[in-house]
Amino acid sequence: MLLAQALLTAVFVSLAGLFTTAAIGLRGGDISRHITYGIFSTMVTLLAHSMMMFYLIGKGKAVKDAMAEHSVDGDYYRRIAAARKPVFSIGAFAMAVTMTAAILGASVDTGVLPPIIHAYIAYGAIACNLAALKTELSALSASSRIVDEVNRALGS
């Protein structure tokens, strides 16, 4: 449970960083701070979502192993796999859009791309990350319930 809380904290920190970066960019003027926050927030976002995916993979493997080791019948593994499946698609998409916004930010800095394109993609990245957070919260909640059910089936 502690690891799940740490992962959610990382996702919230990444979102706060993305919002802060957007606010600094909207005000204009302090481009170096906008770039620094943008790079940092992008890296934290990538770390948070990828670690969330690995955590959910580990939860699924733990359930599968416990079921095999103790000969537990049921659809626990199928349910946990179904709960985590949406996280991989929306999480990967959120990471891709966030990276795209960061990369296109460099194009704005060099004058190759107008700032409005970078801004729209950055706002899209924030929206995608909010959707990923919602999906991750749902998956964490479902996987926690399933693990509790498996523990009860094991008599723990």
Image: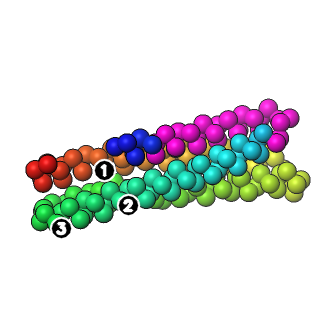
Question: In this picture, is 75 found above or below 48?
Answer: below
What colour scheme was applied to this rendering of the protein?
Answer: rainbow
The single residue placed furthest to the right in the displayed view is: 111
Residues at marks 1 and 3, CA–CA distance in whole angstroms: 18 Å
The single residue placed furthest to the top in the displayed view is: 27
Residue in front for this viewpoint, 16 or 116: 16
Q: Is mark 2 on a helix, strand or loop?
A: helix
Taking the image as shown, residue 92 lies to the left or right of residue 139, namely: right
Q: Provide the major secondary structure of the magenta segment.
A: helix
User: Splitting the image into 4 quarters, where does residue 55 fall?
Assistant: bottom left
Taking the image as shown, residue 146 lies to the left or right of residue 132, namely: left
Q: Give the range drawn in magenta.
A: 7-32
Q: Is mark 3 on a helix, strand or loop?
A: helix
Q: Which of marks 1 and 2 is nearer the N terminus?
A: 2
Q: Which amino acid does label 1 sit on?
A: Ser
Q: Which mark is residue 68?
A: 3
Mark 2 lies on residue: 57
Q: Which mark is residue 143?
A: 1
Residue in front for this viewpoint, 143 or 43: 43
Name the residue at 45% across, 53% down. 52
Q: Position of residue 101 (x, y in %)?
A: 70, 52
Name the residue at 52% across, 44% down. 11
Q: Which of marks 1 and 3 is nearer the N terminus?
A: 3
Q: What residue type is labelled 3?
A: Ala
